[in-house]
């Protein structure tokens, strides 16, 4: 949840936040979850049963705002599938600093030179 708070505060625009906190979205979300029996539809199409509680817009609301509440444009998916759908949002990604390993080689001066 901490990641969602960061995303909501710094990345999600205020209009989108208002939409997702509104009653119409909450009602559509609930209907979608019930319709899909709280199962990930992407996994289900592959024959895998995965519990899910994320409702995903098939066609993004940025590009198709008129479909934002259309049940045909909504599906229940698991967190893993949602992360694959939206890698740009960085859900579930931890920022890991890559450690650079430097090999140190010790040498001695060649006796023939001195």
Image (cartoon, rainbow, N blue to C red):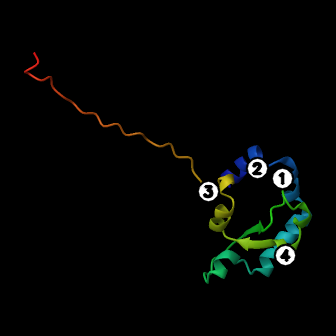
Q: Which mark identifies residue 72?
A: 4
N-term-proximal mark, 3 vs 2: 2
Distance CA(mark 3)–CA(mark 4): 27 Å
Mark nearest the camera among 4 and 2 is 4
**Residue at screen point 76% across, 67% down:** 56
Badge 1 local density, few (<14 within 10 Å), some, or many (20+)?
A: few
N-term-proximal mark, 3 vs 4: 4
Mark nearest the camera among 1 and 4 is 4
Asked if residue 105 lies left or right of residue 67, the reply is left
- The residue tagged 3 is 92
- The residue tagged 2 is 8
- The residue tagged 1 is 17
Quarter-of-image position of residue 58: bottom right
Quarter-of-image position of residue 68: bottom right
N-term-proximal mark, 2 vs 1: 2
N-term-proximal mark, 1 vs 4: 1
The mark tally for this picture is: 4
N-term-proximal mark, 4 vs 2: 2
Mark nearest the camera among 3 and 4 is 4
**Residue at screen point 69% across, 53% down:** 89
Distance CA(mark 4)–CA(mark 2): 26 Å
N-term-proximal mark, 1 vs 3: 1
Instruction: Give whichever of 69, 114 is nearer the camera.
Output: 114
Distance CA(mark 1)–CA(mark 4): 22 Å
Circles 2 and 1 in contact, beta carbons < 8 Å: yes
């Amino acid at each position: 949840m901490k990641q969602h708070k960061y995303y909501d505060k710094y990345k999600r625009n205020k209009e989108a936040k208002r939409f997702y906190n509104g009653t119409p979205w909450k009602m559509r979300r609930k209907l979608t979850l019930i319709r899909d029996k709280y199962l990930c539809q992407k996994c289900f199409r592959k024959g895998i049963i995965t519990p899910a509680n994320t409702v995903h817009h098939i066609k993004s609301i940025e590009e198709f705002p008129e479909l934002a509440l259309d049940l045909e444009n909504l599906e229940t998916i698991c967190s893993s599938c949602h992360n694959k759908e939206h890698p740009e949002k960085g859900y579930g990604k931890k920022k890991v600093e890559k450690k650079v390993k430097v090999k140190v080689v010790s040498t001695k001066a060649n006796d023939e030179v001195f």
